[in-house]
Image (cartoon, rainbow, N blue to C red):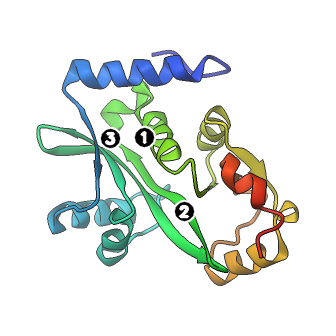
Amino acid sequence: MNTILDIEIDHVIEEAEAFCEATGIEIKLVYKLSNKSLELISERSKALPTLYFVSVEMLKKRVENGCFLLVKNNEILGHIFVHEHQVKGHFVYERSCLWVDDAYRKFNLGLLLMARMTEFYSDTFLISIAQTPKVHHYNELLGMTHVTLSKMSAVLVQELEKLGKLRDELNFKYYVNACFEAEIRQLK
C-alpha cells in the first residue's frame, strides 16, 4: 500500500475496503459488545502508551454511541469508538480508542475506521483530540479542521477543562468536523 501524502482520499478508502473484502475482514457498526470483548479492549488501552486507559464501564457507555469494528473469524482486528460529552445542552462526540492490529496497519485500516466514524457523525459535533502527526494528517484528509483554543468559545474551553480534555497545544491538536466548525465560536 502507498504512503498517503496528498493523494485522493476516496481512492485510499476504496483500497482499504477492497483489502477488507479480499481478506475476509468485516467492517461492523455495533452498539453492544460482550464483556469479554470490552475487557480485551480495556486491557489493550492500558498496555499501549498511545491509548488512554478506558475501563470496561466507560467502554459500555461509549459502545452505545456506535463503535466500528474490523472483525475476522470472530477476532477484533480494529476498533474506534466515540465518547459523548454534553456542553451547555449540545452533544459533542469525541472520536476515541482507535486501534488496529499491528499486522494490518500498513493497509490504511485506521484511516478507514476514522472515515467511517467521521461520516457517521457528519451531522453533529465531532471532535478529535490527538497527539500523533499521522492522526493529524488523517483528520485533514478527512476534511476536519484544526482549531486552536483561541478560536473556540470561552464556554467550550471551560467545558473542555471541566471534562479533563484541555490539552497542551504543543503536543495535542484539536480537529473538528464542518458541522462543529460552523458553530465553534458561538457555542454557549
Q: Secondary structure at mark 2?
A: strand
On residue 156, the disc is: none
Mark 3 → mark 2, Cα distance in angstroms? 24 Å
Alpha carbon of mark 3 to alpha carbon of mark 1: how far? 13 Å
Q: Which residue is mark 3?
A: 101
Image quadrant in which the C terminus is located: bottom right
Q: Residue at x 83, y 64 (%)?
A: 185
Q: Residue at x 39, y 70 (%)?
A: 54
- Left or right side of 33 for 144: right
Q: Quadrant of residue 74?
A: top left
Mark 2 highlights which residue?
Answer: 93
Q: Residues within 10 Å of mark 2 (few under 14, many from 20)?
A: many
Quarter of the picture containing the N terminus is: top left
Residue 57: where, in percent of width, then height?
31, 78
Q: Nearer the viewer, mark 1 or mark 2?
A: 2
* Earlier sequence position, callout 3 versus callout 2: 2
Q: Amino acid at mark 1?
A: Leu
Which mark is first along the chain, 1 or 3?
A: 3
30 above or below 59? above
What residue does disc 1 label?
113
Q: Secondary structure at mark 1?
A: helix
Q: Residue at x 45, y 29 (%)?
A: 108
